[in-house]
Image: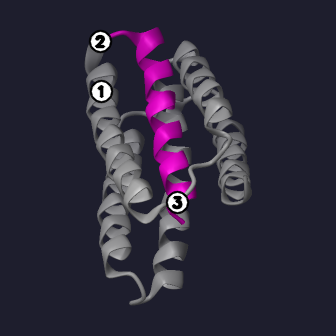
Amino acid sequence: MLRVDQAGEFGATRIYAGQRAVMGDRGPTSRLIARMAAQEEGHRQRFDAMIIKRGVRPTLLAPLWDVAGFALGAATALIGPEAAMACTAAIEAEIDLHYTEQLEQLGDQDPELSAVVTEFRADEIEHREAALANGAENAPAYTLLTAAIRLGCRAAIALSKRI
């Protein structure tokens, strides 16, 4: 669980880095992205510490997630602020499902990890809601765009569990 969660938070930081590289620091969407990026970086750092503490091997796919995340972020930002928000809405919908499944699997077996996942899940839901409130559904081809991103997110989760 830690391997895939750390990989996901790393990927999120790269998506926001790609968006910020294209959008810069201008406008309300850029400021929102900067705030969400800072939260994701905090999540990544906490999972990094837990991985070290527990001796868990990070995913070997980190170099791929580095490039793919940045590219996804940059591509959606190039389409426009609404597409950048659609990307966030899609990813966070999948992460909400992923974290919910993890919490069900954990039960009361690992209170520390459960507490972290619960906290981060709340942040991810907040990100999704903020993205929707900031025009995600106005993105060109919203349904197609978000379906493709959600599929990619599910594939990344599946691959990071194994590799």
- The residue located at (32%, 65%) in the rendering is 116
Q: Earlier in the sequence, mark 3 or mark 2?
A: 2
* Camera-side mark, 3 or 1: 3
Q: Say whether residue 3 is magenta.
A: yes
Amino acid carrying label 2: it is: Asp
Residue designated by label 2: 25
- Mark 1 and mark 2 lie on one chain; the one further toward the N terminus is 2
Residue 129 visible within the image:
no
Residue 18 shows in the view: yes
The residue type indicated by label 3 comes to: Val
Q: Secondary structure at mark 2?
A: loop
Label 3 neighbour load within 10 Å: few <14, some 14-19, many 20+: few
Label 2: few (<14), some or many (≥20) within 10 Å?
some
As measured in the structure, the alpha-carbon distance from the residue carrying label 3 to the one carrying label 2 is 36 Å
- Give the residue at x 50% y 56%: 5
Q: Which residues are magenta?
A: 1-25
State the mark number for residue 34: 1
Q: From the image, give the main secondary structure of the stretch colored magenta.
A: helix
Do callouts 1 and 2 mark residues in contact (Cβ within 8 Å)? yes
Q: Is residue 90 magenta?
A: no
Viewed as shown, does residue 160 lie left or right of 2? Answer: right
Label 1, label 2: how many angstroms apart (C-alpha)? 8 Å
Image coordinates of residue 41 in percent, x first then y, are: 34, 38
Disc 1 residue crowd, few under 14, some 14–19, many 20+, Cα 10 Å = some
Residue at which label 3 appears = 56
**58, above or below 158, in the image:** above
Q: Nearer the viewer, residue 145 or 53?
A: 53
